[in-house]
Amino acid sequence: MSMERVISALTSLGLSRSEAEVYIYTANRGPQKAEDLAKSLNFCKSTIYSCLKNLKNKQIVTKDNVTYSALPFEEALELLIAREKKQANQLQERKKRFLAKKNK
């Protein structure tokens, strides 16, 4: 699978391009320190830390002491898809509540 295709899949599921690149690099190379990621990807440290924080919040990257590890691609996709489904369901519920109030 091409890198652009993987990035496209990840961005379509809510990751920024930078987050996708950090995830892919970590998934392919194994546990990484934030500083090493910044050097390897040529990102500033603040961008790396922001990406890692967001990826941790999405539960597709974990932190152990000073290193970050990525879940396998298939597991990460499943988590991201479940997250998108949950958000879609929440939007549907908001729509129903809005329409119910409007019709009263």
Image: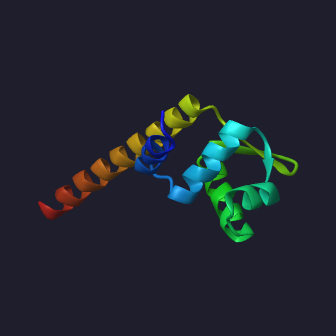
User: Could you tell me if residue 71 is visible in this image?
Assistant: yes
Q: Nearer the viewer, residue 74 or 44?
A: 44
Q: Is residue 23 above or below residue 95?
A: above
Whole-percent x, y for residue 60 in the image: 62, 42
> Residue 53, located in which quarter of the rendered image?
bottom right
Q: Nearer the viewer, residue 33 or 54?
A: 33
Q: Residue at x 48, y 38 (%)?
A: 2
Q: Nearer the viewer, residue 10 or 100?
A: 10
- In the picture as drawn, the residue positioned furthest to the right comes out as 65
- Describe residue 100's horizontal placement relative to residue 12 as left or right: left
Q: Residue at x 66, y 67 (%)?
A: 47
Q: Residue at x 88, y 48 (%)?
A: 65
> Residue 101, located in which quarter of the rendered image?
bottom left
Whole-percent x, y for residue 20 in the image: 55, 50
Whole-percent x, y for residue 72 in the image: 63, 31
Q: Is residue 57 above or below residue 81?
A: below
- Describe residue 38's horizontal placement relative to residue 100 as left or right: right
- Describe residue 101's horizontal placement relative to residue 6 as left or right: left
Count the marks: how many? 0
